[in-house]
Image: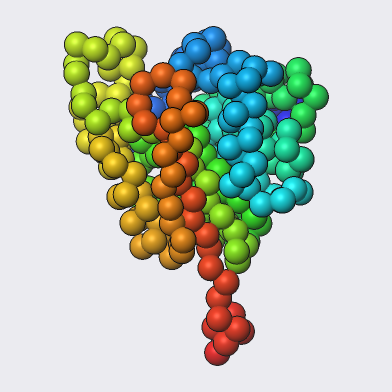
Amino acid sequence: MADGRSSDLCRAAYEPNDVQTHITTFWSTVAADYEAHGGNVAAYGSAEYQTWVDALASVLPDPPSDVLDVASGTGYLALAAALLGHPVTAVDLAPAMLDELVDNAAIRGLDVDARLGDAVASDFSPASFDVVTSRHLLWTLREPADAMANWRELLRPGGRVVAVDGLWFTKWDENDVPTLFAEHYTESTRGELPFIHLDSPEPVVRMLTAAGFTDGEATFRPDLALGDGVPYIITATRPYEPVGKAFGG
């Protein structure tokens, strides 16, 4: 498990653009209090939390499978996967979020390899993982087509993308947005986030298909609701290559 120092050692390796700077600054600012808000996560050990763990188990392969959790935040999904017996690597661009993840893992006695890293272009060797997971990332994901192409390369043949998200900002009311959020998710920043105002998950499924995934599916899960929005789980699979193509034929 990471000891919290890895984020300090790697911070200089990333020079995010202005859009990502706004996003990362916001999540770094709210990291310490993120899990204190009931609309963000279900309390660890609660019946609602067990529902989340069961939902995750239903879409992950049998353990142990190598899981990469991108934009992991405080590690809500990463730690649930570790609890299920999977080796988990978690990446995030907000060091303060990674610090929370490391603390949560230590308290629960779980092993997660936490690293500073970009969900769009994670720095791992091809075919390193069986699953790429994310939770509440898609709406704030810049360059999603590039991200999905990268996830496909990171997965082994037959590997799966599992994304848990919601339609949080189908309607945008400037008078109903917290000041800190509005300061960082400006009109300019939102204009660079293709999925932020979706009213359906279908564009995500179509983009996964365009990136070379198969069996894309969006399943609505109202039982996972913690606040406003429409919760769903999106899954898609990296197909096995034809034998001839795999050997250069």
Q: Residue at x 56, y 55 (%)?
A: 160
Q: Residue at x 55, y 81 (%)?
A: 242
Say which quarter of the image contains residue 129: bottom right
Q: Is residue 138 above or below residue 149?
A: above
Residue in the foreground of this view, choosing between 194 and 3: 194
Q: Residue at x 29, y 10 (%)?
A: 179
The x and y percentages for residue 193 are 30, 38
Question: Would you say 8 lies left or right of 26 here?
Answer: right
Q: Is residue 18 above or below residue 203?
A: above
Quadrant the N terminus occupies = top right
Q: Is residue 98 above or below residue 119?
A: above
The x and y percentages for residue 119 are 49, 42
Q: Is residue 12 visible?
A: no
Residue in the foreground of this view, choosing between 63 and 17: 63
Specify the color scheme.
rainbow
Q: How many numbered marks does the figure carry?
A: 0
The x and y percentages for residue 33 are 52, 10
Say which quarter of the image contains residue 171: top left
Q: Is residue 188 visible?
A: yes
Q: Residue at x 36, y 31 (%)?
A: 230
Quadrant the C terminus occupies = bottom right
The x and y percentages for residue 159 are 60, 59
Residue in the foreground of this view, choosing between 197 and 220: 220
Question: Would you say 123 lies left or right of 208 here?
Answer: right
Say which quarter of the image contains residue 98: top right
Q: Residue furthest right?
A: 109
Residue in the foreground of this view, choosing between 200 and 70: 200
